[in-house]
Every structure is written in C-alpha cells, then in structure tokens.
C-alpha cells in the first residue's frame, strides 16, 4: 500500500521509468517490491500490467538478508478505471492508487481529486466518458 511507503524508502531513487503515457491515467497503483537489481525493467508477476518502475542510484545497498533492493513498481489491474471506466473504481480508487502527475523520484506522490474519482481526466473527456456524481 502507498500509505506504508515512507520517503526514507525512496531516498536512493534517481529516475522513474514510464512504460506508458501516464498523463492519460487518473491513477496508478504503487508498491515497493524486492528486486534483484537497482535498475532495469523488473519481472512482473501480477495480473494486469506494469506501467512504470524506479531506478536506484549506485549508493543503494542491497538487503543483507535477501540480497535484494526495494524499488517502486507502478501497475494497474484489469478492473481498474482506465480499462473499466464504469466498473468497480468508477467513483473511487484502490488504497495504493496515486495520481501519477504527483510522482517524482524520491517523492511518494499523493492522492488527488482526479485519482479518487473526481472530475474526469482530459483523456476520459476526449473519449466522452464521465464519472458518476
């Protein structure tokens, strides 16, 4: 969950890599995953799709116990608002959802009216999709 990620967990991030145009997304889910490397596209083992990930600087240390690095991964599930605008999250968002426009390296990001189901994004407006009141 996003609320369990602290700014301290992100202090070694140098870049966020986006695999999609996130300006068209109202929210992305973020998690802190244990990964074998500081950089490069991580393997993805969830339903849905990965939309981005963080790259860590050379000063990031691996866990002594597991030899892994804690890196953020951004993702969406098949039933998220971008795929099912009238579905489960039509007027709300999952707990780990963050507005991608608020994300930067070392910055946790935050929820916004848009990410929580407020006014529709420009992309949704272009498609003629509105959110319930």
Image (cartoon, helix red, strand yellow):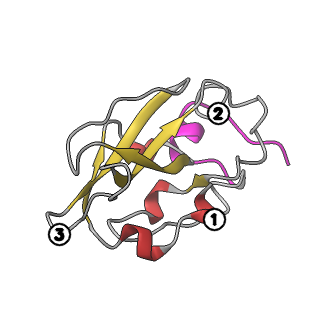
Tag shown at residue 59? 3
Q: Secondary structure at mark 1?
A: helix
Kindly report which numbered mark, 1 or 3, lies closer to the viewer in this rendering. Answer: 3
Kindly report which numbered mark, 2 or 3, lies closer to the viewer in this rendering. Answer: 3
Q: In the image, which residues are magenta?
A: 119-133
Tag shown at residue 100? none
Near mark 2 (Cα within 10 A), the count class, few <14, some 14-19 or many ≥20, is: many
Residue 23 lies, in percent from the top left, at 42, 48
Tag shown at residue 80? 2
Q: Does 128 lie within the magenta span? A: yes
Residue 53 lies, in percent from the top left, at 34, 46
Res 124 → quadrant: top right
Q: Residue furthest front?
A: 65
Near mark 3 (Cα within 10 A), the count class, few <14, some 14-19 or many ≥20, is: few
Q: Which residue is mark 1?
A: 3
Of labels 2 and 3, earlier in sequence is: 3
Does the image show residue 111? no
Q: Residue at x 75, y 38 (%)?
A: 90
- CB contact under 8 Å: marks 1 and 3: no
| Alpha carbons under labels 2 and 3: distance apart | 35 Å
| Alpha carbons under labels 1 and 2: distance apart | 19 Å
Q: Secondary structure at mark 3?
A: loop
Q: Tell me: residue 3, above or below residue 120.
A: below
| Alpha carbons under labels 1 and 3: distance apart | 25 Å
Does the image show residue 132? yes
């Amino acid at each position: 969950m996003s609320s369990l990620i602290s700014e301290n967990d992100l202090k070694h991030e140098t870049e966020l890599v986006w695999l999609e145009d996130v300006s068209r997304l109202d929210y992305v889910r973020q998690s802190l995953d244990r990964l074998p490397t500081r950089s490069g596209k991580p393997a993805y083992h969830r339903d849905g799709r990965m939309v981005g990930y963080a790259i860590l600087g050379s000063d990031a240390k691996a866990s002594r116990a597991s030899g892994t690095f804690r890196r953020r991964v951004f993702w969406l599930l098949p039933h998220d608002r971008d795929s099912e605008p009238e579905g489960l999250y039509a007027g709300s968002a999952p707990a780990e959802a963050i507005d991608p426009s608020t994300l930067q390296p070392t910055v946790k990001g935050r929820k916004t009216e848009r990410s929580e189901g407020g006014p529709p994004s420009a992309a949704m407006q272009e498609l003629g999709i509105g959110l319930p009141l």
